[in-house]
Image: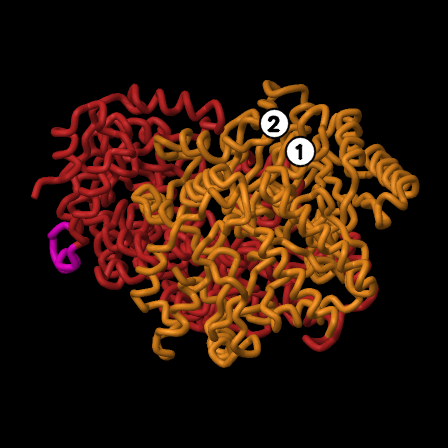
Chain colours: A orange, B red
Amino acid sequence: MASFLRTASRTLPATRRFSAQTPSIATIALQRRHASSAAANGSQPFFPDEPVEPIVKTQIPGPQSKAAIEKLEKVFDTRSLNMIADYGRSYGNYIADPDGNVLLDVYAQIASIPVGYNNPTLQLAATSPEMASAIINRPALGNFPQHDWADILETGILSVAPKGLDQVFTGQSGSDANELAYKAAFMWKRQQQRGGANVDFSDHEITSAMNNQSPGAPELSILSFKSAFHGRLFGSLSTTRSKPIHKLDIPAFDWPQAPFPALKYPLEDFAAENAAEEQRCLDETERLIKEWHAPPTAVVVEPIQSEGGDNHASASFFRGLRTLTKKHNILFIVDEVQTGVGATGQFWAHEHWNLESPPDMVTFSKKAQTAGYYYGNNDLRPNKPYRQFNTWMGDPARAILFRAIIQEIKRLDLVRHTAATGSYLYDGLARLAEKYPGEIMNLRGKGQGTFIAWDSGRRDEVLKKAKAVGVNIGGSGERAVRLRPMLVFQKHHADLLLERLERIFGS
Amino acid sequence: MASFLRTASRTLPATRRFSAQTPSIATIALQRRHASSAAANGSQPFFPDEPVEPIVKTQIPGPQSKAAIEKLEKVFDTRSLNMIADYGRSYGNYIADPDGNVLLDVYAQIASIPVGYNNPTLQLAATSPEMASAIINRPALGNFPQHDWADILETGILSVAPKGLDQVFTGQSGSDANELAYKAAFMWKRQQQRGGANVDFSDHEITSAMNNQSPGAPELSILSFKSAFHGRLFGSLSTTRSKPIHKLDIPAFDWPQAPFPALKYPLEDFAAENAAEEQRCLDETERLIKEWHAPPTAVVVEPIQSEGGDNHASASFFRGLRTLTKKHNILFIVDEVQTGVGATGQFWAHEHWNLESPPDMVTFSKKAQTAGYYYGNNDLRPNKPYRQFNTWMGDPARAILFRAIIQEIKRLDLVRHTAATGSYLYDGLARLAEKYPGEIMNLRGKGQGTFIAWDSGRRDEVLKKAKAVGVNIGGSGERAVRLRPMLVFQKHHADLLLERLERIFGS
């Protein structure tokens, strides 16, 4: 069976080609074959109906895209727009646009598409009566959860809970998840300071809280790291230190930032120097924990700093943070919003660290298509109800989708697969880096699945040229090219990516 | 045709009765008749298949509910749980539980269900190929919007934009919507202070922003009102002043709160006194705008303070706020998260005010089933991209659902209908208040659709007894009973509610 995308582009009349209303698209989409589990063990494609290579028909944006952008600009800020997409025609690892261009997508909605566009297994979940009910009967989960909410959690979100964590508080975005975790940390610490769950709030606390003053609104903090990204709401933005454009003009809490290790590559050539750098950062973290005027109640860290430029640190550094937080009786929050759900070759990136005791909280979003934080300690449940609460507290529709994603990941063995594909891709990139040392600098992500990046002296130009040769790639930080393919990215996609990169580097 | 709910509960074997897996439920649900538009003009029910009255079979929670709660408690905090719901069996104005109880729901997921549980029109939207694509191909909207995003906005969210506002920034919850609006306000004010959109950030601003210090992270504020509720994220919580339990132990910005008018009821008996009270609040608001150490860049206000106890103020008060904010060159943000989408008898509650110029921003969520803020002034678009940005920036699936909700509201003329039903209900409650003066105090919401509340000396007991007589009602503030029926609430539901209230008051 030929690729639907190629067939359709040849046979549909041009005027009907990209209308969302064309019934044949939906009909054909439903006939797509489910991703093949046989592929997990060999070189067969997961998506037999996927295009065999990118199709570039026009400059991007082409005329149809330009018309759509012009229309959209009147009502919606389009200055951050990268590409107008036609999701009805996107499939597997390929993203389509209204001009008939179909690109290999290794950015995947900023690392948020887990198992391919229009994955037929997810389509089944999305068209189930259970999903329809979740869409139209959205509950206030804290007050009126559905009778099968425990089942949905246990067979979905909690079935992949990090080791040692068995409870979840659901939310709506990565920022939201982090702020919920921060709130849990503040309540936990103040409860300790008061003398336990049974000690009630004082009148002074109650009065001062209503006036946004200490002690009710305490002068405590969350410690984060230089170049970190934890979101853009007011609390999470106070822990974000990635780029000025994220923070300028927005009031912030006076919370501390520790240095994040600036490692030198290749790691094996700078082992001693890098270890010293990590120790310096741990020492400064400890100093801030002990001395900052608003004492930290938690340290929050990304396993790999993503928006900040794909900055890595060793497992030993993170074990050091776990030790420090235990020593000073504060919490260790691991922000797995971008690293979670398989892309690093483990389901959660912090599994690479072999921690002696689990993180206190792990936040998630993006590929999970829902959000929240895991925890395992009952003391992280506030002493009274309605302290950690909001109307929606997540979205059962998205929790049901995540369950289907988890099932697809397990069925196709995608975490193990991603570890292997990542290794293959990394080796290919290492060869390219030798051949084009000016193009690929500080290649990083070895042993971290497909979570791979490098620095480029002409990053924005590379990203732009990538589109012209049929690949959608993203950047991070000031000069990093970051790869964030989906979990269904395979060796033949890696070959294609390497070949297109070489075309760019040679041009 | 008999009610499905009653038929099903009679004929299905008990063991299969409440399983979400029972295929017959979904099948029968799809056969439900669409809400009848004939009902808008008379006493015909919108939902011919709705139960004719509540069914109370067990104490609430009953044995099945208790088992579900016990199971859920292990993984999810259930202390704020009000009632376990079976949404597959809920329909129209009625919410069902796993024990076969079916209650008239005038709380509606904290004012968030607009057109009835399992509304067949929404079910069509929820099972469309367009919705399936939106669920499984969730885009990073700011980077990769779908080609028909402008259409979805224009035929949906923007088709009900408040007068004078023609752009939207989409978000994920009411809290999120407010924080996005606050960020827009801070960026707008700092741009003015810098001298316009073309004046670049200074090095000092850039450096200080990265350290969470002024001037990059400016010492500016948002002014809110005593008893206000604007959300629970760190910025929005700093403007929330409803209850200590919402705020205790969470760090907050030192932002100002103005007094909100404490009106005396019945309004007509205290006209002069109430006018003086409102003037006092306006004067104090102006003083804070002029004198607060962190100058307010915006005033945020709910048209009716909801969580804070259903506190009303006159149109004149809100016109006064519009005047003050214009006078002092700051923004006027109207938080319509709870009041928006028809329940007050206008699509937006601030339409009751006859403002000379529109609010600068209007935030929405809840009944819209999506979230965001409307604005009309191009200066509220930040001077550069990526300043107001996040990965998801809303959810097209929820935007598509809101479009279907809007279509249903228009088809059934539900805003006009709600104004009329609200008037009928208010008159009935006024009669009850005369008969039971100890039970209904400070009745409020006249002319505000079904957005009605009163104070009760035994509020929590009334809410509990309401369940026993088949009605799900919510509270707000310390002693208010708040009614938040759906827009499909009709006179026969009002009669039923009044009759059940009288049973409670007589007991």
User: In the image, which disc is placed on residue A163?
Assistant: 2
Residue B446's x, y, as percent?
30, 52
Distance between mark 2 and mark 1 Cα atoms: 9 Å
Residue type at mark 1 is Glu
Q: Are marks 2 and 1 in contact (CB under 8 Å)?
A: yes
In the shown orientation, is residue B374 left or right of residue B416?
A: right
Q: Earlier in the sequence, mark 2 or mark 1?
A: 2
Tell me if residue A28 comes above or below residue A149 in the rendering. below
Residue located beneath label 1 in the image? A351
Q: Is residue A342 visible?
A: yes
The reply to whether the magenta stretch includes residue B38 is yes
Q: Position of residue A485 (x, y in %)?
A: 60, 53
| Numbered circle sitting on residue B84 | none
Is the C terminus of chain A in the top left, top right, bottom left or bottom right quadrant?
A: bottom right
Among the 4 quarters of the image, the one containing residue B501 = top left
Give whichever of B383, A493 is nearer the camera: A493
The residue under the point 65% across, 35% down is A216
Position in image of residue B439 (x %, y %)? 29, 33
Residue A285 on the magenta span? no
In the rendered structure, the answer to whether residue B412 lies left or right of residue A463 reads: left
User: In the picture provided, is B32 more to the left or to the right than B184?
Assistant: left
Question: Which segment did they paint magenta?
Answer: B36-45
